[in-house]
Amino acid sequence: MDRPTLQLAVLIERERSPNQWEDWRFRIVDVVPDEGGFGDQPRLLRDDGKTAQFLHPGLPLALFTDEAEGYYLNLSSGAPVCFVMWRIADDDPSRAWPELVTLSYNEAGRLLDAQERVDNVPLTPPLRQWLAEFTDEHYRPEPKQRRRPASFQRPEDRS
C-alpha cells in the first residue's frame, strides 16, 4: 500500500558548556521539507565556537492509517507539532542526530515511555494541511460504550 510520505531535514543546535553542569546542550531548532537540495549527509551550517547548527537531511515522514488517532490528537491539541526523536553518540557526547520524525501524538508518547529523547517544533501550515487532509480521510473515533454504575441500576439488573 502506498503511504503518503515526505522527506524532511532536521536542524539541530549544539551549545558548548551552557552551564557548569553540562558540557553540551542540544535543541531541535526546525524541521523543513527536504526537496533534494540538501544532499544526503549531515552538514555543519555554522559554528561560532559556542553554538553550532547542523542540518540532517533525508528523514522520511510517512503517514499510517493506524496512527490516525495520534494525528487527530496532535491536530486538536491547539498547537500541533512535529515530534523528533534524537540521540546522542555514546562515544562522542558532542554529536547528536535525529533518528525519527513523526506527527503522531501516540507514537511520540510511546517513544517517551521507552526513555527516548523526543522534542518538538511547531507544525508549519503546509504540513498541518497535509496531515489534516489525511486525518479527515482516515480517522474515525471509536464509539464510547457508557456503562451505568451499579448504584444507578435496579437491584435485579445488577450483575
Image: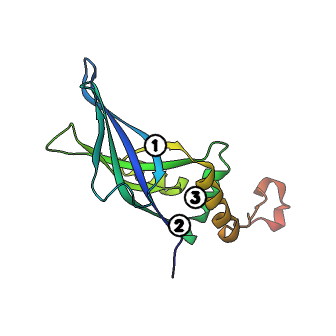
Q: Is 53 situated left or right of 158 in this image?
A: left
Mark 3 lies on residue: 70
- Under tag 3, what secondary structure? helix
Q: CA distance from mark 2 to mark 1?
A: 20 Å
Who's the residue at 45% across and 60% down the image?
35
Q: Indicate which disc residue 30 carries.
A: 1
Under mark 2, the amino acid is Leu
Q: Earlier in the sequence, mark 3 or mark 1?
A: 1
Label 3 or label 2, whichever lies nearer to me, is 2
Figure check: 50 above or below 73: above
Figure check: 71 above or below 95: below
Q: Residues within 10 Å of mark 3 (few under 14, many from 20)?
A: many
Residue 47, given in percent of the width and then of the height, sits at: 27, 31
Q: Is 9 situated left or right of 49 in this image?
A: right
Who's the residue at 46% across and 43% down the image?
30
Mark 2 lies on residue: 63
Q: Residues within 10 Å of mark 2 (few under 14, many from 20)?
A: many
Who's the residue at 13% across and 44% down the image?
91
Under mark 3, the amino acid is Gly
Figure check: 4 above or below 118: below
Closer-to-camera residue (86/128): 128
- Under tag 2, what secondary structure? loop
Circles 2 and 1, Cβ within 8 Å, touching? The answer is no
Name the image quarter holding the C terminus. bottom right
Figure check: 66 above or below 29: below
Q: Earlier in the sequence, mark 3 or mark 2?
A: 2
